[in-house]
Amino acid sequence: MRLSSFAGRFLALAFAASPVLSAQQPSPGTRTPPDSEFRRQRVGIRTDIPFLDVPYNVANGGRAPSMAQSLSITEGFYELAHPAVQRAFGSHTVLADISLVLFDTFGGLLPGGDGWLHEEFHRSVLGSRGVNSFDDIYKLNLAADAVSVSHVNDADLVRMKAEHPADYVRAEAAGIEGENRLIEQLEKNRFYHASRANNVPFYWLTKINSAMYVWSGTGTETDSLTDQMNRSDGADVAKRDWVGHDFTAWVHDLFRPTEAYQARGVHPSGVGINRYIQAKDLTGEEHDFLAREGHLQLLNFLDPNLLGFGGVTLRDPRNGSDLRMNVSASHYLTSFGHTIDVNLFLKEGATNLFVVLHRYTNGARSLPGMEVQLLETPVTVAGRELEVSPRAVLWLQPRDQGFRTTSTQPGGLVAVRIRHATLERVGAFVELEAKTAGWVAGNVHLERNVSARIGASVRLN
């Protein structure tokens, strides 16, 4: 379920009206780094939309969209929509920013928007374990304060919790995982390719909403909302959200991986299982842990992009070339606890490097990880211009994704994406990705996996 915070909307609107947040919208005469401008003129800002993502799309009777598919669609949604709003208001940047907040508040509840992505990340994890569901975003209620993933059978949830407890926990936090991944991708577009989209109001709106959603899990308002939902759902099992409040359920199941799903008891209507976990159902330890995770959400605000700051240009001591750099922090809830990341954006000429330092933490200890991604390196093969993006991740994570275990499990991921660089509106790409057991943001598989994706590289400007 995704909750929309009125306070979050108000704060984002206030920030959007501040002139400092207009900094991301380039003013006339603003200099774009020559390498970025050359690339934008040559191939534009592109999103790679997988038409086929295997094994996910073909497993369990066929599933779509995968995490990669929904993320690429939503990336394109905002890279197209935000510049369109900006163009409509011309030089009136404050009006444009306020309009962007209004668009993101309601447009996020459209298919392809941020709210849709949130629910599709939930559904991707459920679908990976054969659980059918429906995204209520398609009901097009643009004034909804909460949106559900509905039409889920109790029997499927009983099975998933018993057979795949780590996946079940991951599914509960997957909604804001998708939103964090979206912001990361939009920031990459801005830093490496000088995207003209003004996403600053969207960053504020999304980060405030996510933080307040996690914080709300320890408040009495959550219990009132849950009681209201149970009364509204009544005996209609298909209407019920699959989980209720994401984070009261997340911390409850994180601490109780072996507890049977049926232990939640009977729904107040007398029909089905009482799915929704309330704040009053949490132990003191669970309550305090969730409160700490809410405070750690503030790390997501250590991001210069929130002020429209796109990075600094330094002199590379090796060769005297311009070296552009930016840095941000992020906090993800995971199947074993959380990860705190430091994201480093580096650009020199045509070399685009993205580095992430991970700190994986469960209830017993913290463990290290590191990620390196070389983005869109130009290569010519048999006269064809290609862009190659290799990626490597190494980690130590809690064994079997356990919350209380002190045992560790090393692992890693390697991937490469090859895109046909073209002046045409639509090109093509292929990606191969292999990983050991472990949690990776945006990869639905906690177990060992090899995935292949093929699809269209769509030019957005």
Image: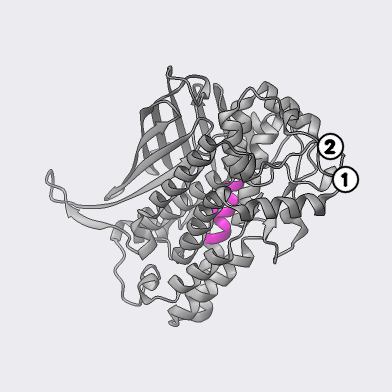
Instruction: Identify the mark at residue 216; answer none if there is no mark.
Output: none
Residue at 52%, 67% in the rendered image: 82
Examine the image and state in which quarter residue 37 appears.
bottom left
Label 2 to label 1, Cα distance in Å?
Answer: 8 Å
Residue beneath disc 2: 272
Looking at the image, residue 324 sits to the left or right of residue 60; the answer is left
Q: Nearer the viewer, residue 312 or 453?
A: 312
> Eyeballing the image, is 56 above or below 343?
above
Residue beneath disc 1: 235
Q: Nearer the viewer, residue 382 or 377?
A: 377
Looking at the image, residue 283 sits to the left or right of residue 238; the answer is left
Residue at 56%, 37% in the rendered image: 251
> Eyeballing the image, is 27 above or below 45?
below
Examine the image and state in which quarter residue 105 appears.
bottom right
The magenta stretch spans residue 75 = yes
Residue at 45%, 29% in the rendered image: 363
Hey, what amino acid is under mark 2? Gly
Q: Tag 1 or tag 2, which sits nearer the N-term?
A: 1
Looking at the image, residue 194 sits to the left or right of residue 108; the answer is left
Q: Could you classify mark 2 by the number of other residues whose Cα lies within 10 Å: few (under 14), some (14-19), or many (20 or more)?
A: some
Magenta highlight range? 69-78
Q: How many numbered circles are shown?
A: 2
Q: Could you classify mark 1 by the number of other residues whose Cα lies within 10 Å: few (under 14), some (14-19), or many (20 or more)?
A: some
Looking at the image, residue 434 sits to the left or right of residue 312; the answer is right
Q: Please name the predominant secondary structure of the magenta segment in the image.
A: helix
